[in-house]
Amino acid sequence: MSEQSEEGAGSLFFELAGNIRLSMLNKLSQKRYRLSQIAIELDATLQEAHRNMMRLIESGLVSKDGEGDLVLTPYGKTIVSLIPSYDFVFEHKEYFLDHAMGELPLKFIQRIGALHDCEVVHGVMAILQRWKMLYTDSDKYIKEIMSQVPLDLIEIIGARVQSGVKFSYIFAKNAVIPRGRSEILQRIGWHKLISKGLVERRMLDKVQVMTIFNEKQACVMFPNLKGEPDLDVMFYSEDIEFHYWCEDFYEYMWEKAGPFDEGKLKPEI
């Protein structure tokens, strides 16, 4: 049974190996086509399009409907829905050669294709600027899972919360706490904001995958091979599927997290 399964998967990957066949599947995921139409759109000869389409039909990925149009089969639709995950990891192959998924639960790895429509932001300063924009542009809420506290942005967050934006965050017990954080929190009345329910917080033993998002924008950072979040490269997007992934991951970690305990944080440095 195991060998048959491996052969089956190998056969599927073989059918998906041609770029033209992948392009055909992508086109058919958007609408139905005649063979001549899809050949024109892919700049392929009719003979080439026919040969590749027959491969897809024989493999059960494509069929013809009652009007003779080419459509994805239910099996084909399922396979096409999985392709973005491979696309995302392959497109960022160099990044994932020295970055891991950390302790990311399998169900989020299987949905990693939801992050496909994104921008890669490089450099700590560019990333901090993007965080600042995300905080400033929030109208309803800000949620984040963090392993470090950006000192320069605390007052921006405080101002947004005081204007009615709800802030929820998860810290790691070993989070890097910059010197001066306590004074800033005291100055902006952080504990009063917590008592009003405008700020909610929980704590994890460690954080490997970081995310920050508001109602419109989201970003995520994966760990290096040491298991520490890499703050030099960030995936950012305003795409709804990207946002859903970050939101679901946050809610999953929120349920796992325990009560926030200021005393368990490392001393300010």
Image (tube, grey):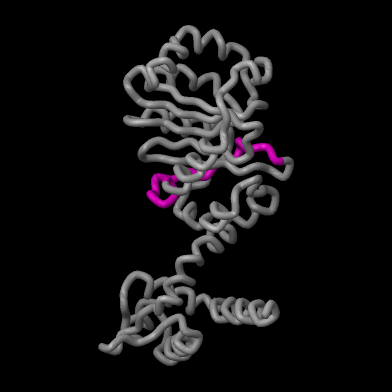
Please identify the residue farthest to the left as the structure is shown. Answer: 67
The answer to whether 124 is drawn above or below residue 65 in the figure is above
Residue 153 pos. (x, y %): 49, 22
Name above or below for residue 22 compared with residue 141.
below
Which quarter of the image is occupied by the C terminus? Answer: top right
Q: Position of residue 13 (x, y in %)?
A: 59, 76
Image point (46%, 14%), residue name? 190
- The mark total stands at 0
Residue 222: name its quadrant. Answer: top right
- Position in image of residue 132 (x %, y %): 45, 28
Residue at screen point 44% across, 37% down = 213
Taking depth in this image into account, of 45 and 18 the one nearest to the observer is 18
Q: Nearer the viewer, residue 111 or 28?
A: 111
Work out whether residue 36 can be spotted: no
Residue at position x 57%, y 30% in the image = 258
Whether residue 162 appears in this view of the structure is yes
Most foreground residue, 83 or 119: 83
Of 251 and 126, nearer the camera is: 251
Locate the N terminus and report the quarter of the image it occupies: bottom right
What residue appears at the point 57 percent right and 33 percent down from the top-left corner? 257
Write the start and end of the magenta stretch as one range. Answer: 227-243
Query: Which quadrant of the structure image shows residue 243?
Result: top left
Q: Is residue 232 in the magenta section? A: yes
On screen, residue 81 above or below 215: below
